[in-house]
Amino acid sequence: MARILKRTELAPKIVELVLDAPDIARQHKPGQFIILRPDARGERVPMSVANVDVARGTITTVIQEVGVTSAKLCAMKAGDEVASVVGPLGRPTHIEKFGLAVCVGGGAGIPPLHLIAKRLKETGNYLISILGGRDKRYVLMESEMRAISDEVILTTDDGSYGKKGFVTVALQELIDSGRHLDYVLAIGPPMMMKAVAEVTRPHKIMTVASLNTIMIDGTGMCGACRVSVGGKTNFVCVDGPEFDAHLVDFDEMMKRLRMYRTQEQLAYERYLQHAGACAG
Ligand SMILES: Cc1cc2nc3c(=O)[nH]c(=O)nc-3n(C[C@H](O)[C@H](O)[C@H](O)COP(=O)(O)OP(=O)(O)OC[C@H]3O[C@@H](n4cnc5c(N)ncnc54)[C@H](O)[C@@H]3O)c2cc1C
Ligand code: FES
């Protein structure tokens, strides 16, 4: 069990939870994730760690409501306890002094970038962060990312904040400006990560993506998180979550993410009806 110490709504259907989890806070390295279960009968879902405070023994995660389990987590309040939190899981990010490093985050993919970007900066990289959202409300953690970046480029799909367009437009402009990019990390919706990989591929820029597949056990046993990378099968929970984005079969990954969509949507509708009925 882990107590929720603080809950903040960052944007519509996006909630930040600060959890009392001293062991995980002490052991966590940038890039690693946790698996949360809201209640004893609930499903376990993987989430990234957006911040760690070792002195206070807390970890922060930012959750986007997309289905039943994320909705249950988003509905929890400060003082509530999640039934379980397991971690840190997965391999930490490989970080070295690459030179010019670019972190590209889309919406709920921005918080998972934060600790990795911070470590990239501390390791001596020149850091450019490209942060994008549907509109201004979804450009998350802007001040935290500004505090650790040498340059920040903001984009919104509707042009309500920063440049109008996708993060890939800003990335393409950066490349076209003649600057030499040594490393790109992308975290966000699978389609965004695929598009980032296609922008950097012709320029042979090292590009890493943190994959958000479906997971069940998180121990490499069930196969739910299987992805093809360079034609070989990998398990995101133990071999990842980060992989060479130029080698990931994103189309297969997106197909597998859609596998249970009908059942997931039905379950979510039922949950929302029940939650509405309980609220009166
Ligand atoms: C390593 C890792 C880190 C993650 N970090 C975060 C995080 O920090 N914050 C966050 O909000 N989410 C994160 N995710 C995604 C999160 O785990 C899923 O959104 C969650 O499991 C959905 O569960 P659900 O029961 O609410 O929805 P479901 O009923 O399982 O799914 C509802 C809808 O969301 C889609 N979906 C399901 N799983 C995913 C997924 N993994 N990625 C994209 N779409 C999905 C389904 O296709 C469906 O349309 C992470 C995933 C991984 C693997
Ligand atoms: S979640 Fe089961 S193998 Fe990765």
Image (cartoon, rainbow, N blue to C red):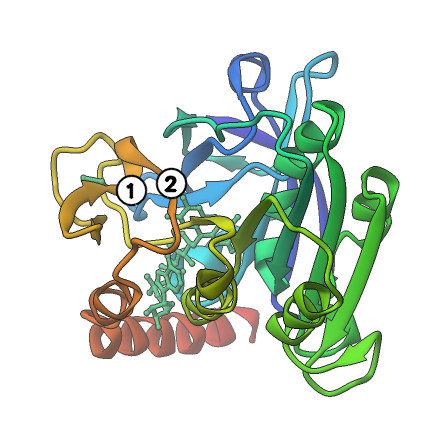
Q: Is residue 191 left or right of residue 205?
A: left
Q: Position of residue 141 (x, y in %)?
A: 76, 52
Across and down, in percent, residue 24 comes to 52, 19
Q: Amino acid at mark 1?
A: Val
**Image location of residue 181, percent across then percent down:** 64, 50
* Residue at 22% over, 37% down: 217
Near-viewer residue (33 or 202): 202
> Which residue in the protein does label 1 denote?
236
Q: Is residue 25 above or below residue 198?
A: above
Q: Can you say whether 5 is above or below 198 in the image? A: above
Ligand 1: does it lie within 8 Å of the C-beta at label 2? Answer: yes
Kindly identify which numbered label has been placed on residue 241: 2
Tell me if the residue at label 1 has its CB under 8 Å from ligand 1. yes
Query: Can I make out residue 38 in this image?
Result: no
Q: State the quadrant of the C terminus.
A: bottom right
The residue nearer to you, when weighing 269 against 140, is: 140
The tag earlier along the polypeptide, 2 or 1, is: 1
Q: In the figure, is residue 27 to the left or right of 126?
A: left
Evaluate if marks 2 and 1 touch, with contact meaning CB atoms under 8 Å apart: yes
Q: How would you rate the neighbour count of disc 2 (Cα within 10 Å): few for under 14, some for 14-19, many for 20 or more? A: many
Between 251 and 221, the one lying in front of the other is: 251
The 10 Å Cα crowd at callout 1, few under 14, some 14 to 19, many 20 or more, is many
Task: Tell me which corner region of the image, top left, top right, bottom left or bottom right, holds residue 26.
Answer: top right
* Front in this rendered view, residue 251 or 218: 251
Give SS at disc 2: loop
